[in-house]
Amino acid sequence: MASGGAQLVEQGAGCRRTDPRSQPRRCQTLEVTPSSLLRIHTILAAPSLLFHASLDLSKPSPSTFHSDHKTSHSMSTEPEAHNYPLHESVLGRIDPEYAAFYNKHIFDKPQVHLQPIAASRSSGILIPGAGPLVPVAKTADYTFPRRHSAGPDVRVRAFTPEGARPAAGWPVCVYFHGGGWVLGTIDTENVVATNLASRGGAVVVTTDYRLAPEYPFPAAVDDCWEAVQWVLGEGKDVLELDTTRLATGGSSAGGNLAAVMCQRAVARPGHPRFKLQLLSVPVADNTADVDNNASWRENKLTPALPAEKMLWYRRHYLPDRADWAHPEASPLLWTGDWAALPPAVIVAGELDVLRDEGVAFGERLRAAGVRADVHVLKGQPHPFLAMDGVLEAGRQAITYFCDALRTMV
């Protein structure tokens, strides 16, 4: 990919998924360069796989922190019935594959920011449309006391790929789930994690970090840092890791946390550096809104993450407005040494309010001489990577991450 522009990825007519056992399908991608010239490429979308692991991931795990915690928002967990059809502002722009799934399965579901938090946490699947879990050799949870911050023990989950361990140990990726720092659990990214482990050839470690509003900023940041430190210490021996090949990643709020981990590692002397960051629809700037950001204005009423819903998440995680511009809440505003940050693969949605801040994050890296592959998926709203079971764009995005992890130097 050229270093000067974000890649606008478009699903071609022949990209519809049929039998998951079929051969890989070809899709067209459009690369947007600074001169707005388009160059057509061909990529392969991987076929779906089946799952086997030692830990039963078909059953949700109880949350370490929230299962019994009552909040002021949980007076009633019964949402009212409403329909939320696609807004006219996105018609004609949204991916037809996404629109069809939304109209069949999502349009009549309660909106997260319009119901009690407890209702959303108890409703089951955070984002519908995930693909199957992929085979891994072992899945295990570990709980350990924190050493760098105050708080309860931290739980992580490790996915070890099948096959022979490399002589130097497994590469490792510490991956953080999405959910606006308010929703999601250690189960949320199981499908993504098994893909990364199996197809990326690395141990993947996910984290059950604390959620807002019970635990606002910087609780999630501290928990994720504890997970990184465990991987570099005890986890290195337990999981047989080569921590010289250390990556991180995450989706949405998790992408925010992953970017912050890379910046912390640079800012704190003596800490090993990450070699790669995988950022899916990341929250990079918590000061962005409809008044100062074009993608927020264009996609104000997009499905999945309309502007008001993103602000709802922000206000729970960052109740003190003074923290909105804190670099560990808004990594785009970090003033450290960008040239010392690791290469990045960033995927964004054309119809996502977060699109421009994700692209801007990649531009900051490039300006500092750091490789950043930025893919803007045409017609996609916010959560497409987690919808790989029904969206070609989701399968494409995961493939970008797996390929980068497998070839991490």
Image (cartoon, helix red, strand yellow):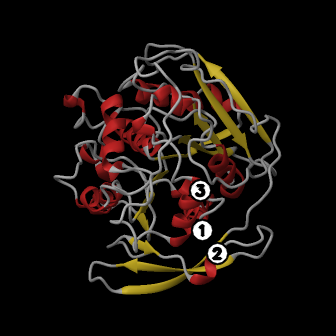
Give the label on residue 392, or none: 1
Judged from the image, the secondary structure of the residue bearing numbered disc 1 is helix
Residues at discs 2 and 3 in contact (Cβ within 8 Å) = no
Q: Could you tell me which residue is drawn at 61 percent across and 41 percent down? A: 125
Q: Are marks 1 and 2 in contact (CB under 8 Å)?
A: yes
Residue 321 occupies quadrant: top left
Disc 2 target residue: 16
Identify which amino acid the numbered label 1 is placed on. Answer: Glu
Badge 3 amino acid: Met
Q: Of callouts 2 and 3, which one flags the residue occurring earlier in the amino acid sequence?
A: 2
Read off the residue under disc 3.
Answer: 387
Q: Is residue 104 left or right of residue 21?
A: left
Mark 3 and mark 1 lie on one chain; the one further toward the N terminus is 3
| Quadrant position of the C terminus in the picture | bottom right
| Residue 112 seen from this side | yes
Is the N terminus in the top left, top right, bottom left or bottom right quadrant? bottom left
User: Callout 2, which amino acid?
Assistant: Arg
Residue occupying the far front of the picture: 81
- Where 155 falls versus 48 (above or below)? above
